[in-house]
Image: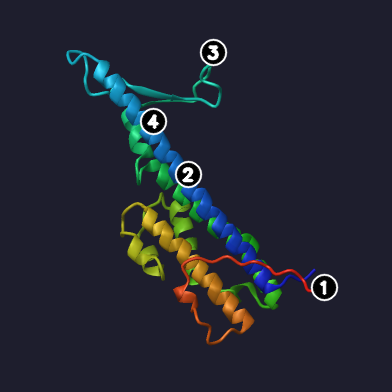
């Protein structure tokens, strides 16, 4: 059964909005872990005699998939509290890992699922479905997966929308502000494609002015 172009675009917008929610929930989870462990470190460090150690380096965090209140628990990770705090801090390794995963997921779903269906809906070749922001996500995906996360000069030059967010010969670092910009650019390009498909001209809001986007499909008339 043939799909409508706007239905496929709507599906990807819903998918992108879902990733926004997951990303924000993850940041809240990291912040909660950080606060909990910082309080534990402070309490335990104060109880340690200064003649032994007052740096808190003896404090460790144990993580397990099982109920920690039960006996014979297997801990899948034991880490120094200072390292755990660093990983869960703003911009830390947990946030970076999650942001990278979201970007790879956003591009992969677009390239493998959405883009071919858009081409089929328009009866055009796959390469005729173009998006600068998705092209940039393709470059970032390859950097993350195949270049150890280092942004080399040739790849940086190829970035059309996101070049100002990354530094040449440095690891990909994705701040909260950068993720916010990427989500907006994705929605703006979805709005552009949708406007072109529907032939909308002279709209009060242009695609480049969009900062958030959701489409509600109307009920069929009886």
Point out the frontmost of discs 4 and 3: 4
The mark found on residue 72 in the picture is 3
Q: Report crowding for label 1: few under 14, some 14 to 19, many 20 or more residues within 10 A (C-alpha).
A: few
* Residue under label 4: 36
Q: Are marks 1 and 4 in contact (CB under 8 Å)?
A: no
**Residue closest to the far bottom:** 202
Residues 101 and 40: in front is 40
Q: How far is disc 4 from disc 2 in space, using C-alphas?
A: 15 Å
The secondary element bearing badge 4 is classed as helix
Q: Earlier in the sequence, mark 4 or mark 2?
A: 2
Q: Residue 198, how many percent across, how many down?
A: 63, 81
Q: How far is disc 1 from disc 2 in space, using C-alphas?
A: 43 Å
The mark found on residue 26 in the picture is 2
- Residue at 37% x, 35% y is 34
Quadrant for the N terminus, please.
Answer: bottom right
Question: Is residue 172 visible to us here?
Answer: no
Seen in the picture, residue 196 relative to 152 is either above or below; the reply is below
* Residue under label 1: 222
Point out the frontmost of discs 2 and 3: 2
Q: How far is disc 4 from disc 3 in space, using C-alphas?
A: 24 Å
């Amino acid at each position: 059964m043939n799909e409508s172009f706007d239905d496929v675009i709507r599906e990807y917008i819903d998918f992108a909005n879902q990733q926004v929610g997951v990303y924000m929930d993850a940041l809240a989870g990291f912040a909660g872990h950080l606060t909990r462990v910082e309080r534990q470190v402070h309490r335990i460090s104060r109880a340690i005699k200064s003649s032994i150690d007052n740096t808190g380096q003896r404090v460790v965090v144990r993580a397990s998939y099982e109920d920690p209140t039960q006996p014979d628990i297997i801990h899948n990770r034991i880490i120094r509290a200072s390292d755990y705090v660093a990983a869960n801090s703003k911009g830390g390794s947990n946030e970076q890992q999650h942001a990278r995963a979201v970007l790879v997921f956003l591009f992969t779903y677009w390239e493998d699922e959405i883009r071919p269906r858009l081409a089929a809906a328009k009866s055009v070749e796959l390469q005729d479905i173009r998006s600068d922001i998705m092209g940039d996500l393709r470059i970032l995906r390859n950097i993350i997966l195949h270049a150890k996360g280092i942004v080399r000069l040739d790849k940086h030059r190829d970035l059309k929308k996101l070049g100002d967010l990354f530094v040449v010969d440095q690891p990909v670092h994705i701040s909260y502000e950068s993720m916010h910009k990427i989500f907006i650019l994705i929605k703006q390009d979805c709005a552009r494609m949708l406007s072109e498909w529907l032939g909308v001209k002279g709209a009060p809001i242009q695609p480049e002015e969009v900062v958030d986007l959701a489409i509600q499909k109307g009920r069929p008339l009886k």
